[in-house]
Amino acid sequence: MLVIDCDAHVEEPEEAWSYLDPAFHRKRPFIVEFPEDTVFGSHNAAWVIDYKLRLYGATPTIMKRSSQKGAPVPTQDLTDVNGRIASMDEAGIDRQIIFPTIWQGPVAEDPELESALATSWNTYMATQCSKSKGRLFFAAVIPYRRPADAVAELRRVKTLGSAAGVYTHGIEWDMPLSNPEFWPIYQEAARLELPLLIHTGNVSPAIRFMAEGFPRPNQVQFPQNNPYGAGLNQVLYGVTQLFGSSAMDDFPKLKVAVLEIGSEWVPMFSKELGERTKFNDWLGDRLFVACAVGDDITHVVNRVGDDCLISATDYPHGDAFRADCLEELLVARGDLTSATIDKILTSNPQRAFTFA
């Protein structure tokens, strides 16, 4: 069985910015460290980008948190590609699609700087993935506030190789995925066979502002996250906006994958959106959903079938979605047929993504 991990991550190293346009040298990201006895605890480092502190997951990797996750830092930040592949072999993973960590929040308010950072990050990822002999792929990041630049970046990324899709939040800054300005992006993504990958994250200024000042009950483990700005609800909002618009009809070759929120929402959306859209026709054909190994997958399969399901390790993150040995964990459940497991790990991802 070919096991395809559809959502892993890189914890960005300084090398991710080594391809930055020299015009932005004075604005390049740099790292600051904190004492460990603050509310940030082991997350005791941050990037300074566009005059603000940015830290998500365990990037930058000089923070103590990076050494607490049971994975060598060079495999986390992809500076050691062979080490990353060795960790995949240990977990029984054949291919891996790698998402950013820092882009789970706003990277820069300056749209021109954000665009330049995206270009550097994509180049770094394409360079490192090209060393993997077809084992590593990545989700490209693009500047949604600059649609023309985003289209150009998609074309450039495609020529670099190893891009498996386009990273997309449920809300891009203050714009829903039904924003007509995104139509050129969707058109180009469809033409290039790069699916939209709707993933957790929060870059919405309005939602982040509303969350300021509220208590953070999870601050000990994840001090950089405010639960009131949770990415899950934003992803579902993005699904509603995208599939409730004409985008899927306008671009019949466009594919979409929804990741890191589990799959238990799908039956409800199948009923609600299925009554007024072609949601159920797209499900398993052009729409794929990453299930968590702890989901009630049997219920999902009984309601909507198993053609839409894919899965992911979330490696090397340390949250509830982390599940390194996918095949072993799915088999151990005891309630899934071998045919369903094969679809989740092999045939469905092969239909969802073009690995080139």
Image (cartoon, rainbow, N blue to C red):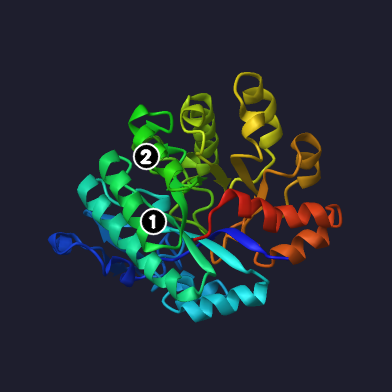
Q: Which residue is mark 1?
A: 158
Q: Position of residue 45 (x, y in %)?
A: 36, 67
Count of picture labels: 2
Q: Residue 60: x percent and y percent?
A: 37, 67
Image quarter of residue 85:
bottom right
Q: Residue at x 33, y 67 (%)?
A: 16
Residue 200 x, y percent position in the rendering: 50, 46
The amino acid on which the numbered mark 2 sits, given as a three-letter code, is: Ile
Residue closest to the eye, 205 or 286: 286
Local packing at callout 2 (Cα closer than 10 Å; few below 14, some 14-19, many 20+) is: many
Q: Nearer the viewer, residue 279 or 54?
A: 279
Q: Which mark is residue 185?
A: 2
Q: Is residue 93 above or below residue 338?
A: below
Label 1, secondary structure: give it.
helix
Q: Residue at x 38, y 43 (%)?
A: 203
Can residue 182 be seen here? The reply is no
Whether residue 311 sits left or right of residue 22 in the image: it is: right
State the residue at coordinates (34%, 48%). 106
Q: Nearer the viewer, mark 1 or mark 2?
A: 1
Residue 15 appears in the figure: yes
136 over 248 or under it: above or below: below
Secondary structure, mark 2, is helix
